[in-house]
Image (spheres, rainbow, N blue to C red):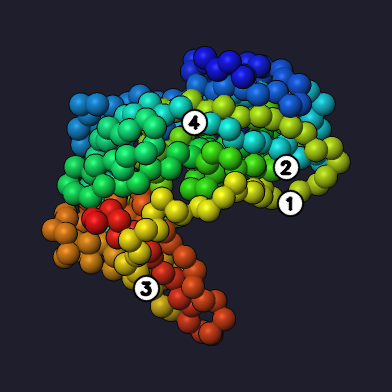
Amino acid sequence: MCAACDHTIHRNSIHHGWSRDFAPVLSARPGARIHFECRDASDGQLTRGSTVSDVAGLDFGRINPVTGPVFVEGAQPGDVLKVTIHRFHPSGLGWTANIPGFGILADQFPDPALAVWTYDTTGQVPAAFGPGGRVPLKAMAGTIGVAPAEPGHHSIVPPRRVGGNMDIRDVGEGTVLYLPVEVDGALFSIGDAHAAQGDGEVCGTAIETAMDVELSLDLIKDRPLAAPRFTTAGPVSRHLDAAGYEVTLGIGPDLLTGVRESVARMIDLLADEHGLDPVDAYMLCSVCGDLRISEVVDQPNWVVSFYFPRIVFA
Ligand SMILES: [Zn+2]
């Protein structure tokens, strides 16, 4: 698979949720370079030819499988697992969905919607969105983490201090991610790759895709870390910046209300200017628009901004 890798973990070695009791699929020395085969977040339920009825019928027990876990030799609670992401191997097929009950505007978009994408596996060519627009690509891992110390089975959906479903656009090639270790061996897993995602992932899904990942796992001993942190290899939004942005605002005393208002206003703007169905504009915002907090000091009102890259319609 990967000449530089010490190990390959195949796509049948998956688990759902997190547990300190999952049996490792591999025991690796610190410094090992590993090739992970990762399934898409629907576990193959949404694919070429899928329709909106397949979104309504999703089996949530299969959502967000992750590949692993890897036992890192010598890792103990209080250590840091240093994850260096070398390379993604995109599959070229992805999907974005509005899943009822999920997403920051779930109350305004109660019906399922689906967009299926075919995209350039080199990442160089923006992906065409069926209803209009072309989205620059940047591969990333949505779910990446280690097992929590707390016994029992934990849902895959919420991220935790040990990482997990963080959905951070900039956990991409070249990024070095530091994760707090809470159990012996760390028990590292990864999945939920995205071909593109905006900051916020506002509709709840990105360009969800099967994608292999090459990464290295290193250990930093006795360095307690309160929460994950990461270092990027370079600029984080260069793929989106060239033509500038449209920006809409939400202004008020509650940040999450500001988020909802700024996103809803961008949906209205995109629907007006480009003739998009509002739910399509919502999905487009999720795959390439960025939420930012512009101001949190001019009390009592904070400013949340939603940045939409104009290059999508350039
Ligand atoms: Zn995802």
Distance from Cα at disc 2 to Cα at disc 1: 7 Å
Closer to the N terminus: mark 4 or mark 1?
Answer: 4
Q: How far apart, in angstroms, are the residues tagged by discs 4 and 2?
A: 24 Å
Checking the image for residue 88, the label placed there is 4
Task: Inspect the image, locate mark 3, and give the three-letter code of the amino acid beneath it.
Answer: Leu
As drawn, the label of residue 180 is: 2
Kind of residue sitting beneath label 1: Ala
Amino acid at circle 2: Pro
Q: Quadrant of the C terminus?
A: bottom left
User: In the picture provided, is 151 more to the left or to the right than 78?
Assistant: left
Nearer the observer, 304 or 112 = 304
Marks 4 and 2: CB-CB under 8 Å?
A: no
Q: Residues within 10 Å of mark 2 (few under 14, many from 20)?
A: many
Crowding at dot 4, Cα within 10 Å, few <14 / some 14-19 / many 20+, comes out as many
Distance from disc 2 to disc 3, alpha carbons, whole Å, reads 35 Å
In this rendering, the label closer to the viewer, 4 or 2: 4
Classify mark 2 as within 8 Å of ligand 1 or not, answering yes or no: no
Q: Is residue 254 left or right of residue 152?
A: left
Closer to viewer: mark 3 or mark 1: 3
Mark nearer the N terminus (4 vs 2) = 4
In three-dimensional space, the C-alpha distance between marks 4 and 1, rounded to whole angstroms, equals: 28 Å
